Image (tube, rainbow, N blue to C red):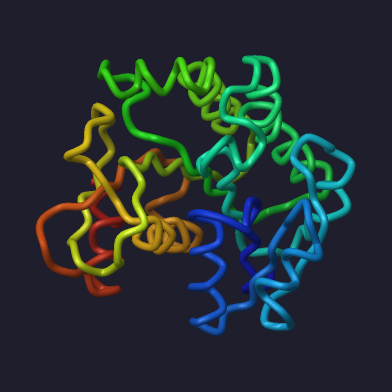
Amino acid sequence: MSDTIAVIGATRGTGLAAMRQLIAAGRPAVAVVRSVEKGRELFGDKAGVVYGDVTRPETLVSAIDPDWAGIVFTVDITGGIAGRGMFASREKIRAVMYGGLVNAVEACKQRGFKGRLVLLSTIGLTQPSTAMSILNRVKSGLRDHSLDKGEYLKKSGLDWCIARAGILNDKPTGAHVLDISARDWPLEMRYQIARGDLARVLLACVDHPAASRRELSVFWGEAGHDSDEQLTHKLAALAG
């Protein structure tokens, strides 16, 4: 197995932050993108760029390398369902949010992928909140789509991790310690996290043994910063 991490949904939001961190760390990275031209504009020759559209399963079969160490799947978390229309019909939203993950999982299985698939999700799916009620209306059926894709991944037979993020923002990274726990939390403004901080956790979840076949929630804690060692200890604590 290679050391390469692939990011599906790599040209915006958390996926873009993850790619930039991989490149900065000198780790082999591949962006799986709908627009190869945009991917090459963003990453140049510093990362691999391959075509893959989550709504077209045959493209994912062609894109996925079974020797990758991990795949970080961030599609649907960024604005407007990854740019596909925030107020689209429930069916079209499900085709991306749920169907996209299903297509990625099945492509991984077809290709014999043995690494870990890390799925970006959201807190609040099992905890009632006003924010989740609103979001579930704006992105029609978001709660069900998110729960369903998580269950599909867990039953897939792949090595997986589901990271449930607090409310995302674009503020500077590294200014807060991270609260990482196994429980779900309500989707409320007090539970926020910068995309860059979230990307760091997602990438750590590819490698950490304690993240295997585990769900976790992550958001900002108090002001400060977690060293790599501290982040490792927090992930290890999930195993009890």
The foreground one among 202 and 85 is: 85
Answer above or below: position of 23 versus 181.
Answer: below
Q: Quadrant of the N terminus?
A: bottom right
Answer above or below: position of 67 versus 162.
Answer: below
Estimate the x, y position of residue 185 in percent, counting from the top left: 24, 30
The foreground one among 138 and 221 is: 138
Estimate the x, y position of residue 127 in percent, counting from the top left: 27, 20
Number of residue marks: 0
| 17 to the left or right of 115 | left
Residue at 62% x, 58% y is: 10
Estimate the x, y position of residue 96 in percent, counting from the top left: 67, 31
Quadrant in the rendering for residue 192 = top left
Estimate the x, y position of residue 129 in percent, counting from the top left: 25, 19
Q: List the single residue furthest toward the left.
A: 222
Residue at 69% x, 67% y is: 30
Answer above or below: position of 78 versus 113.
Answer: above
Residue at 40% x, 56% y is: 195
The foreground one among 25 and 111 is: 25
Quadrant in the rendering for residue 99 = top right
| 183 to the left or right of 88 | left
